[in-house]
Image (cartoon, grey):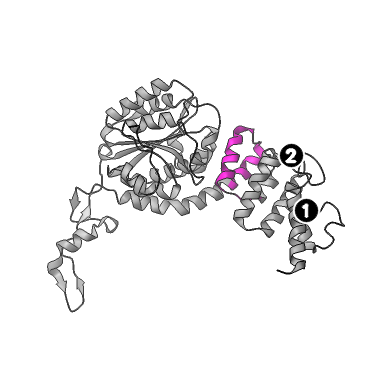
Amino acid sequence: MSLEERKRRWQLAVGGDDEKADGGLSERDRRIDRALSALYGSGGGGQKGPGSLAGSSPRVARWLGDIREFFPAPVVQVIQKDAFERLGLKRMLLEPEFLAAIEADVHLVADIISLGGTIPQKTRETARIVIRKVVDELMARLAQNTIQAIRGALNRHKRINRPRARDIDWPRTVLANLKTWQPESNAIVPERLVGFARHSRLADLDDVILCIDQSGSMATSVVYSSIFAAVMASIPAITTRLVVFDTSVVDLTKKLADPVDVLFGIQLGGGTDINQALGYCQSVVRQPAKTHLVLVTDLFEGGNRDALFARAAQIVASGVNLIVLLALSDDGRPSYDDRAAQYFASLGVPVFACTPDRFPDLMATALRRDDIQAWAGQSGLGAIRAPA
């Protein structure tokens, strides 16, 4: 690396507070320096000054345009996160110009829905557009695998001989038609198709209840859970219910046709009453042996912990397939209540954090009633073990 390039990088690293200090930089470098100084320079930290972004949404839009021009998307998202924390930009989410310019991701969606009813009416439509963009991108990434995994978990004990193309059990079809092997064409001409039976009556369907902690620490888990609930609600082989809770419980099942409506129905933040939420879920269970209850929470109970433990034991004893996800996000190992996690594990309940890309396989494993603890171990998800 040349001496000139080293000097350039050093000037960008330390920042230029005056014209003399950045005199050796090109105009493009000066723009990079100004964009970074606005956040990390003397005007940062949420105080007004030469580099402050406060009070001018058009300036924020220009600043966002600069960082998106100069840096790749992962770096842009890091800078935006720092901006929320250092410059108090959450209040600027109230400005349409900001929402229109920002590089949207799941964390921004969580920030927007955390503002809830404080977003003025003039900005709500812009906020919906931003959320819609992120939701559509996530649906495109997650929906197909989820649908395929769940369809693959159809009741494999029942077989039919006139299946639809998507329900054909190809390994068994091949075995059933080996006698039709034609060496000259190197092919089997099947005389009989073997397929998985589809559920034809509501009473035959498996029920999935997603019970989601909407306290502030679970923000990205709430976003992913809502999207998965909407995807599963579109699959006729199961029934899906979405319940969110803090110190109150809200059933959002009727909104599942549109995950954006679901997200706008969520109020992130507040306390946590897991026992009350499980009590509601317990009340809507129709057939325990065919119900899968996925509780997404860090297990920090704000209500009666002993009552929570007793209710969890009742639910497990009833035959419900209870699963606890400490998080459903890409954010790494979450903070959680270790004592509560170990108690649930002592009931035989799988307890672990799950990433969105593994969730479809988790649901398929649950629907087949396979060993979820073993699956989590094989998937590297580190299930909590019961105390010895």
Query: Could you say where residue 24 lies in the image, as x and y percent from the top left?
Result: 82, 63
Residue numbers of the magenta segment: 102-130
Q: Is 116 one of the magenta-colored residues?
A: yes
Residue 324 occupies quadrant = top left
Kindly report the distance in space between the C-alpha atoms of the residues bearing marks 2 and 1. 18 Å
Disc assigned to residue 46: 2
- Which residue is denoted by mark 1 in the rendering? 15
Q: Nearer the viewer, residue 168 or 22?
A: 22
Indicate whether 314 appears above or below 321: above
Mark 1: which amino acid? Gly
Indicate whether 318 appears above or below 61: above
Q: Is residue 92 visible?
A: no
Query: Could you say where residue 270 lies in the image, as x and y percent from the top left?
Result: 55, 28
Q: Can residue 86 be seen in this view?
A: yes
Mark 2: which amino acid? Gly
Q: Which residue is drawn at 76% across and 41% down?
A: 54
Q: Which of 365 and 124 is in front in this view?
A: 365
Q: Is residue 250 left or right of residue 312?
A: right
Residue 111 occupies quadrant = top right
Q: Which residue is drawn at 26% across and 44% down?
A: 199
